[in-house]
């Protein structure tokens, strides 16, 4: 499929996990990629790999929690490619704590990256997406849809992303900009691999977040993101799509 020929896509958190898989998937479908991340070596390697496959790709360091860096990244993307058609907000961080032990600095950091970063990117990209009648795909989580152990801060951030998605979808529906979200569950990513139980946690609670199909792969999420961002999703906006192997079924 070449659903993204002549389309420019900006992917945050592009260097690894779901962000990398999304960049690779869209590149194979013809997209020109602008890949942003805080991991310089990894995002540089991604872009080199995409170019080796014949894709057009650029990279830029960007901490999405910094609105000045976000504004500069979006401006650089549009300067390079002349437009922006799709924004994929994948960048995010995760940690697990007992709620009464969450440090304020950790709470604020999760909010800064997962919530502020998503909003800053949407805000900077929307003028260009209005011009191209483009769309946004945000990455939320099944943590926004059900109670998950030790995830008070993370769940709050992903619930905010989901609420933001639905609100933007309505705000801009008449201007031709679609906004959707995916809600991954148990997906094997660097974030997933770094998971550690907080001290004294009951491991039986893990059953609430374990898929009966086993862990998914980043490519499973990337395929759904590609569908939502393409013309195959032309009549979908304000939606959240679970990708959780039946965990919440």
Image (cartoon, rainbow, N blue to C red):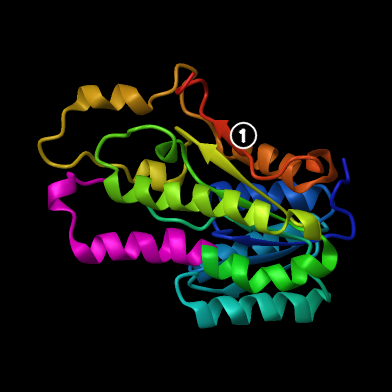
User: For residue 65, what is the image quadrant?
Assistant: bottom left
Q: Position of residue 196 (x, y in %)?
A: 25, 42
Q: Please report the residue visible at 40 percent of the width from the left and 53 percent of the height from the top.
A: 157
Side of 74 relative to 200 (left or right): right
- For disc 1, the neighbor class at 10 Å (few under 14, some 14 to 19, many from 20) is some
Side of 176 relative to 159 (left or right): right
Q: Secondary structure at mark 1?
A: helix
Instruction: Provide the residue designation for mark 1.
Output: 220
Up-down relation of residue 44 to residue 214 (above or below): below
Residue 101 drawn in magenta: yes
Q: Please report the residue visible at 44 percent of the width from the left and 32 percent of the height from the top.
A: 186
Side of 110 relative to 200 (left or right): right
Up-down relation of residue 215 to residue 87 (above or below): above
User: For residue 134, what is the image quadrant?
Assistant: bottom right
Up-down relation of residue 244 to residue 237 (above or below): above
In terms of secondary structure, what is the magenta stretch mainly?
Answer: helix
Q: Please report the residue visible at 62 percent of the width from the left and 77 percent of the height from the top.
A: 73
- What is the magenta range? 95-118
How many numbered marks appear? 1
Residue 164 drawn in magenta: no
Q: Taking the image as drawn, is residue 141 in sight? A: yes
Q: Position of residue 75 (x, y in %)?
A: 69, 80
Residue lying farthest to the left in this orientation = 200
Q: Taking the image as drawn, is residue 44 in sight? A: no
Q: Position of residue 143 (x, y in %)?
A: 40, 38
Q: Please report the residue visible at 61 percent of the width from the left and 63 percent of the height from the top.
A: 45
Looking at the rendering, in which quadrant would you find the N terminus?
top right
Up-down relation of residue 235 to residue 109 (above or below): above
Return the residue nearer the eye: 126 or 80.
126
Q: Position of residue 243 (x, y in %)?
A: 56, 31
């Amino acid at each position: 499929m070449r659903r993204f020929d002549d389309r420019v896509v900006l992917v945050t958190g592009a260097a690894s996990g779901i962000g990398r898989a999304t960049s690779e998937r869209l590149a194979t479908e013809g997209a020109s990629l602008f890949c942003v991340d805080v991991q310089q070596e990894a995002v540089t390697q991604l872009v080199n790999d995409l170019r080796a496959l014949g894709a057009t790709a650029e990279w830029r360091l960007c901490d999405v929690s910094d609105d000045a860096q976000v504004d500069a990244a979006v401006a650089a993307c549009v300067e390079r490619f002349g437009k922006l058609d799709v924004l994929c907000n994948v960048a995010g961080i995760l940690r697990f704590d007992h709620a009464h032990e969450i440090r304020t600095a950790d709470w604020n950091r999760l909010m800064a990256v997962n919530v502020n970063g998503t909003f800053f990117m949407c805000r900077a990209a929307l003028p260009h997406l209005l011009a191209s009648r483009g769309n946004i795909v945000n990455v939320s989580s099944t943590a926004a849809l059900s109670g998950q152990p030790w995830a008070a801060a993370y769940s709050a951030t992903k619930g905010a992303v989901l609420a933001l998605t639905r609100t933007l979808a309505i705000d801009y529906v008449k201007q031709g900009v679609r906004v959707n979200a995916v809600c991954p569950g148990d997906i094997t990513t660097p974030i997933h691999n770094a998971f550690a139980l907080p001290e004294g946690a009951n491991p039986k609670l893990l059953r609430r977040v374990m898929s009966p199909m086993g862990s998914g792969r980043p490519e499973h999420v990337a395929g759904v993101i590609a569908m939502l961002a393409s013309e195959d999703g032309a009549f979908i906006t304000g939606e959240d799509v679970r990708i959780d192997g039946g965990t919440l079924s």
